[in-house]
Image (cartoon, helix red, strand yellow):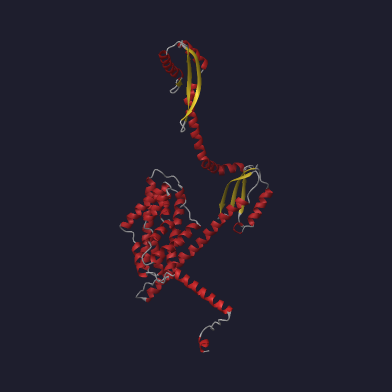
Amino acid sequence: MDNYQNSDKPPVDPNNNSGHLEHRAEGIWESIKLFIKDLLEIRHDTDRESTIEAVKKDISFKGHNAWILIFSVFVASVGLNVSSTAVVIGAMLISPLMGPIVGIGMSIAINDVLTLRKSFINLGVMVGLSVLTAYIYFLVSPVKEETPELLARTYPTILDVLVAIFGGLALIVAKTKKGTIASVILGVAIATALMPPLCTVGYGLAIGNWSYAGGALYLFSINTVFIALSTFVVTKILGFPLVKYVNSKKRRRIAQIASTIAVIVMIPSVILFVFLLQEQVFEAKAKEYVSNVVTYDGTETIKSTYDYNKKSIEVYLIGKLVPQGTIATWKKQLGGIEALKESQLIVHQGSDPSGSLDELSTQVRSGILEDLYVKNQELIEDKDAKIALLENELSKRSGSEFSFSDVSREAKVNYDGLQELGYSNLITTNFEKTDTIPTFNLTWKKGISEAKIAAEKQRFEKWIKLRLKLDTLKVN
């Protein structure tokens, strides 16, 4: 009775099956929670003091780090210039770009203004040195073609934001572990791709394309902000100690400054993330809509463009004229899609007598030709190879196009012992290649010695080669 009063729960009656099952289920649930907690717990294995020291050590860009950065920028620029993914990855492996960015996030979290100031200064040095190095390379490089690797770094997408968020989280968690996981840090350096956007900024400046330079700098800024933000969040969660100041008034002021900076960073970041997410959803839904809805027998969609800012979907059609009723149905279906309900469908038709054929021609001609070229490049090269082969064969056989009657009359005059002359093209093969050989069959009159036949045959072969301008033939 006393045990019952002192315990939180009544004892389980062994004869009560429902109570027994409830108790077992509760025990299993507690075991699962304990297992998950033990699996994901990182506080006990976090070395806070060593992490702070390591982060501060990686912030500086003097001496060796500066030269490593310069050389890695050159390597990345070469990789972007020739569109070599492997070379770009190699450059990201050796580039020391993460230090100041992680330093910014951690210093805000622990109210360390001196480290924050140092991180910002070194981040500026890093960006300036990287852009200058890439600018010099692309300025002197004879190859300034817009490769896919360069174009991929001219504007951020939602994928870049997500990679920066989770990459930054992985990086700071790896740094806080006792015995830093180097492979994780290298992997984050590759995934977040800080180096290529800076090189693309230099490329844009070198060719005078401000759009490329601005877009690449925008992409780098996004990666930087979200890596720093991830560092800030993890540092706060793991309870890193705040920097202590002797003056309490100064401590409060520093805390206010750090909190203000954190808010300034977080609010635009969240807004940017939402905007990019909406843009990505818009484009994905627009592509799906054009593929599934904008269809008509006898008409083909040759191009479609999507503008999230203008909320417009432009489709270029060629073939039969699509009735306005059908287009109206398409527009009605567009309004039924949540992500596209405020969008406008603009249809350009190649058969439209109103004059949009010219508009279509001017707006899409280059795109159509480019698509046709890309899709048929291998076919064209194969055709060229076959044409070259046929021309070569024709040149070989050009000597075989002759008047057999003229040659036979000349042979009868030149060779008294010749009784019969035959000609054919003999096709031979060694099972690796096939060749066609002009062949002459000679029949001599009876009574002529074998020695004279051999001599006449040899003389005939020399004469017929000269007569027909052939390098290869056969005389039987």
Depicted 464 relative to depicted 436: above or below:
above
Please tell me which residue lies in front, 438 or 162.
Answer: 438
Compared across the picture, whether 50 is left or right of 351 comes to: left
Depicted 169 relative to depicted 137: above or below:
below
| Residue found 51% across the figure and 76% down from its top | 27
Residue 186 visible to the viewer: yes
Please tell me which residue lies in front, 223 or 443.
Answer: 443
| Residue found 44% across the figure and 19% down from its top | 465
Residue 124: % across, % down: 38, 59
| Residue found 38% across the figure and 46% down from its top | 139
Residue 474: % across, % down: 45, 22
Which image quarter: residue 358? top right
Depicted 28 relative to depicted 229: above or below:
below
* Number of residue marks: 0
Compared across the picture, whether 252 is left or right of 402 comes to: left
Residue 3: % across, % down: 51, 87
| Residue found 39% across the figure and 56% down from its top | 127
